[in-house]
Amino acid sequence: MTVADLPKIELHHHLEGAAPPEFIRALAAKKKINLDGVFDAKGHYSYPDFLGFLQCYTDATAALSTPEDYYDLTRAVLAESAENNVIYCETFLATEFCGDGDLVAWREYLSAIQQAATEAEAKDGIILRGIMTAVRHFSPEANRKAAICGAETAGDFLTGFGLAGDENSGAFADYKYEFDMAKEAGLRLTAHAGEWGGARAVRDAITDLNVERIGHGVGAIEDADLMRELVDRGTVLEVCPGSNVALRVVNRWEDHPIARLREAGVLVTVSTDDPPFFHTTMNHEYEMLEQVFGWDEATLRATNITAAKAAFCDDATRAQLLKKIGE
Ligand code: ADE
Ligand code: ZN
């Protein structure tokens, strides 16, 4: 079996961040929206650094303005995921892009995304779940609305609440109210931490927001005590090595701490984050893990078992995933 054939579970994925550039370009052309600066001469997303990436990402979403656009986006993105043998994906959703925090509008966007997910599941067997996401560089009002919309629509499809954006802006504790509200509504919790903010950020996310998973979390490698704590707590890291290389969190794949974290007993999983922005796919991530760190089929399968156990889904879906992975 090649890595391409392995059934894969992806826990860290942003819906707009997975938009194929040609999809965004076609939509922008149809609506006569000017996206100068978003693409390079080859038609790839173009940005100079992390903050530039966040801006490019936001600029590209100008093309996405209706629930129908999100239906089409979800179908396009899931077709690509299914080609990579992804059998289950959790995608981050942001109300700011989907109706600007208005609950009635959000329900329409969510329903369109869910409809696309249901059809993709019937066609390719791929299962999608959504994680409502507060974004650190959006306003506190926008993030409060994200929590309200998330809490109001928590259910079988929308199963999680997260925090993304510029980790250097504000403190984790600033989001405690939103995370408490989400938890009370039954949403499971994750936060981007330790992508840029080091071990300190990972510790803060766990202590201040009570999250059960960490987005990225690679900064934990700096702190042996924290790594032991992650092992003891069973905290799962949603690691996105290709993203970290593309955004220069690390300089080269060879420098990436995913193998060292795993050897220390930390529970790691593998995701793409924003695949076309980072010129990656799930197959590419797995090929690199095989080439650079010598991860064999058993190791990659074990990572997927970790992901299935940490997935924000109901137990019947989890059992189905574990069976497909061959547990
Ligand atoms: N939003 C989309 N991708 C992100 C990343 N890698 N870090 C923070 N926020 C993001
Ligand atoms: Zn992310």
Image (tube, grey):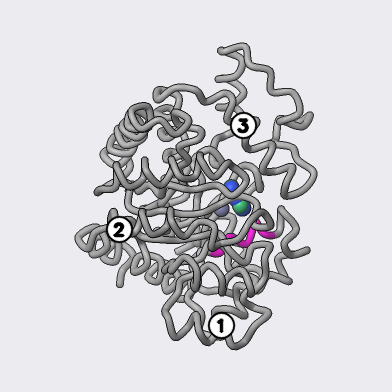
Task: Classify mark 2: residues with Cα within 10 Å, few (<14), some (14-19) or many (20+).
Answer: few
First in residue order: circle 2 vs circle 3:
3
Which span of residues is magenta-colored? Answer: 239-244
The residue where tag 1 is placed is: 227
The residue where tag 2 is placed is: 184
Q: In the image, residue 274 lies at what x, y percent? A: 58, 47
| Secondary structure type for disc 1 | helix
Task: Classify mark 1: residues with Cα within 10 Å, few (<14), some (14-19) or many (20+).
Answer: many
Q: Nearer the viewer, residue 301 or 218?
A: 218
The residue lying at 40 percent from left, 30 percent from top is 102
Mark carried by residue 76: none
Q: Is mark 1 within 8 Å of ligand 2?
A: no
The residue lying at 25 percent from left, 48 percent from top is 155
The residue lying at 29 percent from left, 42 percent from top is 153
Q: Amino acid at mark 2?
A: Glu
Is 241 magenta? The answer is yes
Image quarter hosting the C terminus:
bottom left
Q: CA distance from mark 1 to mark 2?
A: 28 Å
Rendered image quadrant of residue 171: bottom right
Q: Is residue 301 above or below residue 158?
A: below
Q: Please state the total of marks drawn on the protein image.
A: 3
Q: Is residue 10 above or below residue 209?
A: above
The residue where tag 3 is placed is: 21
Q: CA distance from mark 1 to mark 3?
A: 37 Å
Q: Is residue 139 left or right of residue 53?
A: left
Task: Classify mark 3: residues with Cα within 10 Å, few (<14), some (14-19) or many (20+).
Answer: some
The reply to whether residue 274 is visible in this rendering is: no
- Magenta stretch, main secondary structure class: helix
Q: In the image, residue 87 lies at what x, y percent? A: 36, 53
